[in-house]
Structure formats: structure tokens, C-alpha cells
Amino acid sequence: MNIFTRLRPLLIALWVFGLTGCDATADRPVVVQFWAMGQEGEQVKALLPEFERRYPTIRVRVQQLPWSAAHEKLLTAYAGDALPDLFQLGNTWIPEFVALRALEPLDGRLRAWPEIALADYFPGILATNRLEDQTWALPWYVDTRLFFYRSDLLAAVGFAKPPDTWDDWLRAMTALKAAGGSVRHAILLPINEWQLPVILALQNGALLLRDRDQYGNFQDPRFREAFLFYLSLFERGLAPPVGNTQMANLYQEFANGVFAVYVSGPWNIGEFGRRLPAALQDQWMTAPLPEFTKTFSRPPVGEGTEARVGASLAGGASLALNRTSPRREAAWKLLEFLAEPEQQAHFYQLTGDLPARQSAWKDPALAGNRYAQAFREQLRQVKATPPIPEWERIANKLAYHAERTIRGQVSADEALAALDRDVDRILEKRRWLLAREQQPSPPAPLPLAGEGSEHPAPVPPAGEGSER
Amino acid sequence: MNGPERHAAWSGWAFAAPALLLIAVFFFLPVLAALLLSFTDFDIYALGDLNRLRFIGFNNYQQLLQSPLFWTALGNTFYFVIMGGPLSVAVSLGAALLVNARLTRFPGLFRTAFFLPVVTTLVAVAVVWRYLYHPRYGLLNYALSLLGIEPIDWLGDPDWAMPAIILMAVWKNFGFNMIIFIAGLQNIPTQLYEAARIDGASDWRQFRYITLPLLGPTFLFVALMTLIGYFQVFAEPYVMTQGGPANRTLSIVLLMYEEGFRWWNMGYASAAAFILFTLILAATVLQLKLRRGQD
């Protein structure tokens, strides 16, 4: 008896707590967990009051991840069953998360969208979000690489307009180098980056991998040709053989004219604006990449039309739903909201990230940005890297072997052979999985090695090969 | 064993049990799991679906031993241990002798000052050292320029990056060993020095024939701890250079981290961990053997 009197306050407390608990569930808002990276994670918060006003029953909690740890963090979260309801991911990571079966397929939900909405996305970018005939994520903002150059220095060597062929770019860069003496290089290409050799190879029609992305294809003549051209930029002294950690202050060097051309992405529009001295603000510009052909120049243009833009990489970040989340409906509403052209335009104003939807580019802030126009042109000419989870490792290997070649430790052909060997090893698991998938119910041994392209293959992994 | 003895044994086990249990659950079990993992190809595919896991025997070990990157990392790690280890021990000993010397004023102040880097966050230290190492605006190159030496790209030059990291690591860590050396020095009876002085022994002879031999056990402890710690170098290159330039500061643990948590090749990374474990074990045993041989 005594014990009850003693416990009474506690029991009352529990009872009251229980009551209020029950009351609250009726209109307690659904809390959507949303992970976003870097400044996107910071700035997206400004869009959310409008969303929460429209959906009073949904609250959004944004968790900001640093870009440098984002990939590890997402994978660890997956392993620990702690993925948020909605998350941002680099579009080259999508194949990985599809392989993990971590993403909610979106096609069912997208059927409710008007057709023009999907057509509004840059097609090359949207393609990176589609695998195995399914849409797994929607592009949030887009990213590609093109030329940033010093228009004053280029004009000084006789190029009032940016060249539109690799031939002319080579001529311009040679002149830039000659005019600048020993301190100047024409172009900065950090030797530990894989992007430019891959862009050149894609422009040249090279298949980076072969047989349904089961083997490396880097000794292919088309890749080799592009790779040799890339190396020649260093051999001719047009590009200094330095890594990106070695260029102490890129913006200052660009302002000093240590180099006049740089291949980079949209984030540098803002950075160049902020970090270059005011006097230089009219002296730089952006230009799309030219097309790469056998002679590095444009084939005779029949109709005398505008310059032809060469392909670049389909980069950017996407938003995806966690397949196991019980709050997928609410998270999808948030995804739809962030995909609206008005929100995309607003997000551009906040972050400088280029909108994935073309109608958002009509926004005066973006239409009036002269540096962004080249990106718009370039974004219509983008190609995807092979859509397999192993791609990032392969790209890393490519950068490693390219750096060794540029440093003169191995010859180009040795490097490409070693690259193919490394890549074949990385893809061993993929070959095993595909072979197993194909095995009909009575286990029949399959020819694993060799060409094997005759497999009829009802196989998913992705259109990359067929497109080229 | 009679009654009371058995009783004592039981209560002994009972007292030790919680600690043993914790060690078993949080140390031996994960180590065993990692050992098993090192014989599989656990990767991103297996993470999504365990059906896609294969037992592949010693394949990971074989591939590691064939991988040039592993040998680069191994070479870098040995470079770090062989250059950094003795340097660290020597600097600690020197600092301990200075702080402990009779003529030193405010020994407490110096002891604290030298120990400060040990308790400072490595990331903060690394940021400051990156400024010091800056090729154009860094303090270090400025000092060198006063001596008429050309600027060095400390963290960008493949040949200088590792020495730069060793320098920082030694500066960051020597305080800890210094404290242990000071304790060792203070354990040496002062009568021995007095007797030696009466016999007319010089400072050097006192150091050589009294200090060093009597510091023996301390020395062994410090050397072993430094060896084990330096073999596992990770944070310094991770924060300062990310293994670059041209993989010249890639250490084994950094390689393991990259393989495991960047590329999610858990099997491969576990194999690297066990190879490192074997190496450390071998180096430790060797050092103990050498020490015994001396005695």
C-alpha cells in the first residue's frame, strides 16, 4: 500500500504524459529528415518556410553535411539503417545507391507529372538519374565543365572572340605562352584530375568500358588519341605539371596572368566574381568546350552556322528518397517542391547553383548573368560517365595513371595498359554478378572472359554503351 | 586447491569478468569479425545484399601484395617510422634532459609548454602548420629566405611532403614521451651523480654511464610505444595532404581507410589491417629481442 502512495506522483505524471502524448499525435506534424551538402544544406533552409506554409502538417529538419565527408557519411548511414527520408547525392553516386537498393523508384510518382515537366530538365543530366529503365532521383542543380579564360590576354594575342575549335584553342594557347615568357602557362589542368581526359575521350567517341561495362577499354585507339592530345598540352609546356593542391592561390594566379585558361565548373562563376580584383571583372569570360575530331578541328561546316559545342560531363547533384522511409509521401512533396521552376530559380539566387530545369533559366537573375550563358549551351551537350558503382574508383585510377605519365614515370601506352589491368580487376565482381544473373536455372557454365558481346542480355546496367 | 583458495580464485574472476566481457565484446569479437571479413570480398554490392558476398580465401592478401599502391604505402610508412621514430625519441630525450637540468629555471613552465601540442586538436594544429608550410607566404620559407635558401613547396613537392609531415608529427608528439623520460630521469638516485662528480666524471660521461643505462626500461617503453604509434600514422597525412602529392604521403592506415570507407572494400581493407598488425607485431618482437640481447 505504502508503495502505491509513494508511486502516486509518478503514476500521475505518466498518465498526464500519456494523455498529452495521445492528444499530440492527432496533429503532430510529420518531420521529414533531409540531408544536404555544403552551402546547399545551409541555403536550402531559406526555401523551407514557404514549403511549411503550404503543408502545415509537414516539418523539415535539414542536416548539413560537408561535401568532403558526404559520400562516406551516406554509405555509413545506409549500413547503419540511418538514412534520412530525403537526401542530396552527387549524380555519379546514383548507380552505387541503386546497387545498394537504397533508393525509392520514382517513375510511379512521376506519372502524375505533366509530360512537359520532365522534358524541362536538361536531357543529358536527367539521363544520369535513370538506370535500369527507372528514374531513381531528380536533378536538383546541374554542373558541367568548360573554359574560364582571360578575355584581355586572349585579345592581346589576336583572339577577340574565344576560339571554337581545339585547333584554334591550341594556337591561342601557344601564342599566350609565347607572349607571357617563362612565368606564364597558357592553361591550368591539375594533373590529379580525371575530368579533361575523359571529356576529350567522350568527345572522340571512345567507349570507356566495353562489353556492358565489364572491362576497361582504355587502350582503344579513340581513347588513346584523346589521351595523347591531353598529354601534349603538358609536353608543349602549355599546362604546368602541378596538382590542384600545389597551385597556392588559384584566383591570384589567374589575376596575375600566370595562366589564362582554366577548365572548371559553375561554382567558379561566383568565386571568380568574389575573389578576382574589381579591375579584372570585365576581363574574364566563359566559353563552351569545342568539339574534338581527328584533326582536333571542326569538320568543314556546311551551312556556315554557329560554332559547334563539344560534349562535356553531365554533373550535378540530385535528390532521392530513401526506400525504407515511412515518410516517403511527405518527403516526395518536399522533393516536388524543390523541383518547381520558381524554387529552382530562387535556389540559384541563394547559391549560384545552376537550375536543372531549363524554364528556371528564364529568371532575370540568371538570364542576366553573362557568365552563365556558356553553361546553358554546354549543358545541352553533356555526356554521362559509365553508370556503374565502380566508376569513381575507375576515374581515380585514371587520374593516378595520367599523373604518372605526365610526370614522365611511364609511357602513355604503359599507363593505358596498366589502367586497363587495374580496371579489369575492379570490375571482376561486376562480371561475376552479371554472369550469375544470366545463369538460367539449370546452372550452365558461361564464357566469362573474352569478348562475350554476343550475350543477348536482358540486362539492366544502363544505356551508356548503346548511346555511343 | 583448497576451499578458501578456490573461493579467492572465483572472486578474482568475478571482479575481472566485467572488464573481460567488455574487452571480448568490443575488441576480440570485432577483431575476429575483421579477420573473417578479410577472407571475403565484402563490398558495396554485399552491403546491399549479402547474397553477393563471396569467400575468396587469401585473394585479398594476394592482391594487396601485388598492388604497387600497397608497396608505395608500405614504403611511406617505413620512411615515416624510420625517420620520425628515432627523431621523436631523440627530441623527447633532449627536451627531458633540458627541462630536468639543475640550471633550468621554471621547469614546470617548460614542461607544460612542451606538452601543450600533445593535447591540442590535430586538425587545428594542421591548419596552422599548413600556413607555416605555405610555399609563398609561409613563415618557414620566410625564415629560410633570410638564410638565402630558395623557397620549398613543403606539402606540394613529392620529395618534401613526407619530411614536412614528419616534422609536424614530431613537434606534435614529443611532449608525451618527454614526460615519461622526465619521470625516468627523476627515478635515478642523485647519489650516483654526486659520486661520479667526486670521481671527476665529465657531464658527457655521467650521461653515458649513468643516465642512459638507468633509463633503459623507460627507453624501451618509449621506443615501443613510438614504433607502434608511428606505424599507424593516419591523421597527419589525412588532414595535411590526403596522401598526395603523387601518393608520397599515403600511409598504410590511410590506404586502409580509403579502401574501406571511401570505396567500401571492407574485405580488402581488413586484409591491409591484418598485414599491418603482423608487421607491428614482428617489429615489436624484434625490438624486444634486441633489447634482451643487450642485457
Image (spheres, helix red, strand yellow):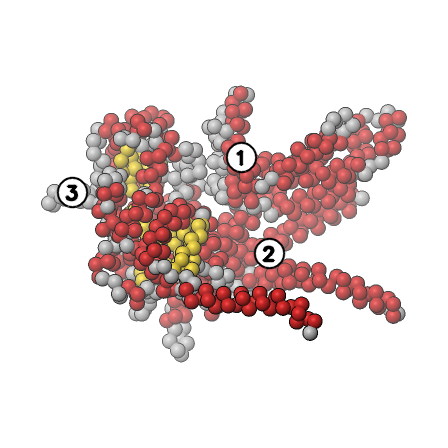
Image coordinates of residue A56 in percent, x first then y, are: 36, 59
Q: Chain of mark 1?
A: B
The reply to the same-chain question for discs 3 and 1 is no
Left or right of B243, for residue A210: left
Tell me which amino acid carries mark 1. Val
Image coordinates of residue A368 in percent, x first then y, are: 23, 40
Q: Judge by depth and name the residue closer to the eye, A341 or B87.
A: A341
Tell me which amino acid carries mark 3. Glu
From the image, tell me which residue sits under label 3.
A306
The answer, for residue A374, to whether it is visible in the render is no
From the image, tell me which residue sits under label 2.
B274
Which residue in the rendered view is the most extreme toward the left?
Answer: A303
Residue at position x 84%, y 68% from top?
B6
**Front label number (1 vs 2):** 1
Tell me which amino acid carries mark 2. Phe
From the image, tell me which residue sits under label 1.
B128
Residue at position x 31%, y 39% from top?
A269
Q: Quadrant of residue A131?
A: bottom left
Q: Indicate which disc, 1 or 2, sits on the residue closer to the N terminus.
A: 1
